[in-house]
Image (spheres, grey):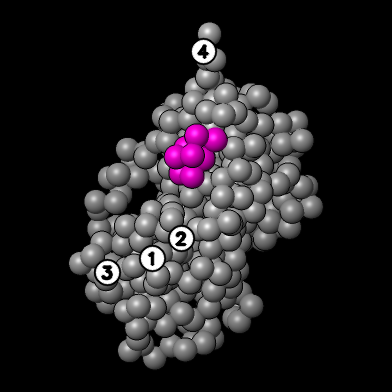
Amino acid sequence: MAKTLKHTRVELNNAVFSLPDIVAKAEGYFADEGVDVELVVPEKRKAMLAAAGKPIKQHTAIQSFLWHEGIEKGEFSVYHACEWGQMRRTQDTCAGVKVITKRAAVSTQAIVVRGDAPYNVPQDLANVEVAVNFHAGSHYITLAMLSGYMKTEHIKTLHIGIPNQRFKALVEGRVAAAAVMEPWISAAEKMGFKVICEAFYNGLEVADPTVDDGIFHALRRAHIRAVDKINQDIRPWLHHLTQEVPADIVKLEPSDLHLPRLRYNHPELYTQAEFQRTYEFMLERGLINADSTFDKLVRSRAAA
């Protein structure tokens, strides 16, 4: 008798973040673990990919879920994103969503400027608007990177949305700087743009209450196998990244990607000490509520 697979839906994010999901699905690792995973591109994300991106100056004017709001509507049950954003969205959830683990992708974002820009070091960006996606990794990593070089009042961020929108605004001269991840960093470098600063950061997986311990551990085992496959040789999978950059912007080849930027680890337990450091960073900047404690946001039972 054929084995009945448990079904769950996982959000498909930017390829650099979702590569372990893509590999696990393609290689049959999810099925091997007894789970039928449907990779879902949220409807709101599809709309944002086709839009120009509206500039917004205040993070309080943007709801924290962005295209991830699909988990609140039952569109999918699991997704991963930056550590800071996941804490904020878990605070704001009305669907019982909790953090369950650190994600496999260790990501980097860079603040880039055009090649003819007068900026060369982070200090040059004092009072210069940097295009970010509020309540997402580009927003928080920009605050973290620049706070080492200038006072908070001199850090200026402007919401323009997802990476293709921010990059297009930079190319067209509508913004002076933008924070982007791969493959957009490599696209910028191929176009002769300058990287002003760059930093790596962790992400978190979150899930709604339908994801029980059995599904959680099945996903984790599949992700571990996928990470090992990626780290053995990532090159067969690089086209998933490069195809995100339209050819009319720049023809990006897999060989253009700087492989040391692409880091994947086995998903690990999200500890209270890690939570506390991030919580204090966000609380100081008015990005999270004081009562959003570890016990409220993290499903430690499943993560263990």
Tell me how far mark 3 sits from mark 4, CA to CA. 45 Å
Closer to the camera: disc 3 or disc 4?
Answer: 4
**Chain part drawn in magenta:** 22-29
Determine which residue is flagged by label 1. 254
Q: Amino acid at mark 2?
A: Arg
Which residue is pictured at 43% across the width and 88% down the height? Answer: 119
Front tag of 2 and 3: 2
**Which residue is identified by label 4?**
2
Q: Which residue is mark 2?
A: 235
N-terminal-most mark, 4 or 2: 4
First in residue order: circle 4 vs circle 1 = 4
Q: Which residue is mark 3?
A: 251
Q: Is residue 48 left or right of residue 300?
A: left
- Under mark 1, the amino acid is Pro
Q: Is residue 28 magenta?
A: yes
The relative height of residue 166 versus residue 118 in the rendered view (above or below) is above
